[in-house]
Amino acid sequence: IGPKGLRTAYELLLKGYSKEIPLSYFYVHDEKYAEVANEFYEKEFLYFKELGIKLNGISNINLKKSRSFSKPPKFVNLKFVDFPLPATIDVYQDKVLLTTWRDKPFAYLITSKEISENFMSYFNQVWRLAKK
């Protein structure tokens, strides 16, 4: 719970990371919580860069149209869709991190090979449809 809890969740998500495996994520942009989420992820991007991890992300088109959008760092490959995404979700190896920003930042970390494979399969399908 809260930014410190989310930071801990990301550290657990990336425990035993490999630079060869990108972190794949869905990001649901909503102006209601954009300021808090953007501030958090700007710091996390520094952490990801330190680790040398590449990111493949898919966001709703609202992010690209928002006033808070800026070009992502070079290690982030970001695409957009014009249909709803289920949630802010990170998938890495056998872990899935579900995050909500509504009232207070809150994350659920799931360790399950089956669940992570299902989310990666969904991510790959959406990735094919998404546009730069």
Image (tube, rainbow, N blue to C red):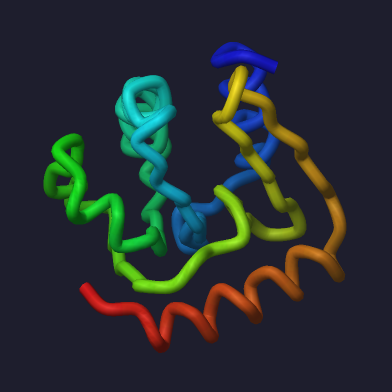
Q: Position of residue 84 (x, y in %)?
A: 50, 66
73 left or right of 81?
left
56 left or right of 93?
left
Q: Residue at 61%, 41% (x, y): give it.
A: 14
Q: How many marks?
A: 0
Q: Residue at 84%, 49% (x, y): give it.
A: 111
Above-or-below relation of 112 to 31: below
**Which of the two residues, 89 or 65, is positioned nearer the viewer here?**
65
**Which of the two residues, 84 or 88, is positioned nearer the viewer here?**
84
Image quadrant where residue 64 sits: bottom left
Above-or-below relation of 94 to 108: below
Image quadrant where residue 43 sits: top left
- Name the image quarter holding the N terminus: top right
Q: Position of residue 16 (x, y in %)?
A: 66, 43
Image quadrant where residue 117 sits: bottom right
- Name the image quarter holding the C terminus: bottom left
Q: Residue at 43%, 79% (x, y): give it.
A: 127
Q: Position of residue 27 (x, y in %)?
A: 46, 51
Q: Residue at 50%, 57% (x, y): give it.
A: 26
11 left or right of 54?
right
Q: Position of residue 124 (x, y in %)?
A: 53, 81
